[in-house]
Image (tube, grey):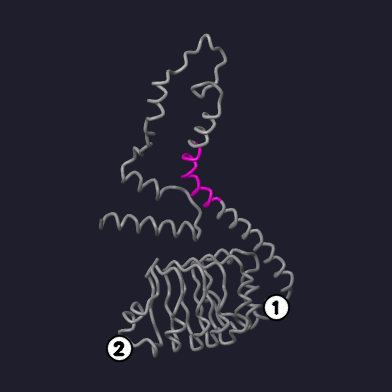
Amino acid sequence: MVRITENLIRRRAEHNNCEIFSLEEVSLHQQDIEKIEHIDRWCKNLKILYLQNNLIPRIENVHRLKKLEYLNLTLNNIELIENLEGCESLQKLDLTVNFVGKLSSVESLKNNIHLRELFLIGNPCIEFEGYRQYVVATLPQLKYLDGKEIVRSERIKAGQGLEGVRRRIEELEGEYLRKRAGDRLEDQTQEKGESQPEKKKESVSSAKENKPGFDGRWYSDINNTVPVSGNNKENRSGEEPVEKTSSLSSEEQEKEFWEKPCAFTPESRLEAHRHLEKKKNKENG
């Protein structure tokens, strides 16, 4: 996992003579970062923060950035809008192509009174019926949503029947979150599946030891069954288990990985990244 270090920020602060305490803008995009950390303590004067195209699952550790005006988190693994209340100067928030499915989390932005632009394009929540009406009515300070201006007539209309829209959003959220829970469970099951064959071997071996008969087998007709001799038994028990090796070439395995059907989730995106990282390390060997 790539960490945000002081050295990394200094390298990105060349335009500021590598000084980070007075830094007002920093770009940490495409760094494979998996956690936002330290920035709010080291760079309290930040006004613009670019963190797009990383692997960040949560918005966190930015509450001390009182001067932050623009936060770009495009192309990450974020599922919830949170922890931005302390960003008092925030004017623009870009969450394009993430995994925000809990639309009601936009309510956490109510106190960001200077927020003018919000981007949620490419998130599951924009598919919810009443999405735009709900956001426009919930955040009256917004001027643009997904790049489209919010005109006065739209704002007035959005406020009408808001309670009904809110109830519908809650229902759709519930459906989505249940589906996400199922996706996570399926991913966990698949991960555990790799170790199941080994466990199955152990259980079969254990069951065999508990069976009656001096060689550990059942005999329905002792006259027609020839038991294994003691020597043969010893030889068999001493045999090394033969591991099943894949007959696929590396190219075929690569093709199989990328063509395998899967849902687009934070987990699948992270899995693809790990796969590429492993391949790169192997090539650099």
> Residue 85 is drawn in which quadrant?
bottom right
Q: Which residues are magenta?
A: 186-200
**Left-right relation of 204 to 154:** left
The residue located at (49%, 70%) in the rendering is 96
Q: Main secondary structure of the magenta part?
A: helix
Residue 246 picture location, percent across and down: 36, 39
The residue located at (73%, 76%) in the rendering is 160
Per the image, is 29 magenta? no
* Alpha-carbon span between mark 2 and mark 1: 49 Å
- Hey, what amino acid is under mark 1? Gly
In front: mark 2 or mark 1?
2
The residue located at (37%, 30%) in the rendering is 239
Q: Mark 2 — residue?
A: 17
Q: Nearer the viewer, residue 214 or 108?
A: 214
| Disc 2 packing (10 Å; few <14; some 14–19; many ≥20) | few
Tag shown at residue 159: 1
Secondary structure under the numbered disc 2 in the rendered image: loop
| Disc 1 packing (10 Å; few <14; some 14–19; many ≥20) | some
Residue 249 picture location, percent across and down: 31, 42
**Left-right relation of 21 to 149:** left
**Left-right relation of 147 to 253:** right
Residue 5 picture location, percent across and down: 38, 76
Classify the position of the N terminus by image quarter. bottom left
Q: Nearer the viewer, residue 184 or 69?
A: 184
